[in-house]
Amino acid sequence: MSAVTEELQADMQASSARAGLSAAIIDGLTSSTCTGPDVWKTVGESGVRVCVLAGERQDPVQTTREQGKTLKETGPAKNQTENKAFLVREAMHAWSLSHPALFAEGIDAWIARREMPVGYEEI
């Protein structure tokens, strides 16, 4: 079962519709099966710039690495896309709660298209 609430999912769908992502993609990303390569291939092909993150201690790092690779390979520029995957060492799944400043710095850097802060390791 997904940890995404219906309200959050609806908000994501509304925001994503403005960015060009379909509700089907958002449903796939928020389901418990969002690790499937077809979902990430579709996201990569959408042209929307994507960052995926993994906390080293609890998240599936290899899966996140594969998601990042798929996003890069299917992006509009094929291997030159800005889609990226990052690992945060020693972090749990909900590391945004235990390291809020680092999480916020990363979000700010990603949105501003700056270099990610120390602590984000591209994978």
Image (tube, grey):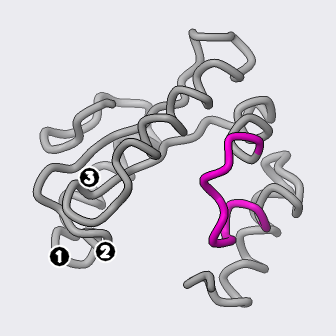
Residue at (71, 69) in percent of width and height: 12
* Residue 102 x/y as whole percent: 19, 57
Q: Secondary structure at mark 1?
A: helix
Going from N to C along the chain, the mark reached first, 3 or 1, is: 1
Residue at (88, 60) in percent of width and height: 24
The vertical placement of 77 against 114, above or below, is above
Q: Quadrant of residue 96?
A: bottom left
Front one among 27 and 48: 27
Q: Secondary structure at mark 3?
A: helix
Q: What is the C-alpha distance between the residues marked 2 and 3?
A: 16 Å
For disc 3, the neighbor class at 10 Å (few under 14, some 14 to 19, many from 20) is few
- Residue type marked 2: Ala
Q: Quadrant of residue 59?
A: bottom left
Residue at (44, 45) in percent of width and height: 64
Dots 2, 1 in contact, CB < 8 A: yes
- Residue identifier under label 3: 105
For disc 2, the neighbor class at 10 Å (few under 14, some 14 to 19, many from 20) is few
The vertical placement of 19 against 118, above or below, is below
Q: Secondary structure at mark 2?
A: loop
Mark nearer the viewer, 3 or 1: 1
- Residue type marked 3: Glu
- Residue identifier under label 2: 94
Q: What is the C-alpha distance between the residues marked 3 and 1?
A: 14 Å
* Residue 45 x/y as whole percent: 79, 29
- Residue identifier under label 1: 98
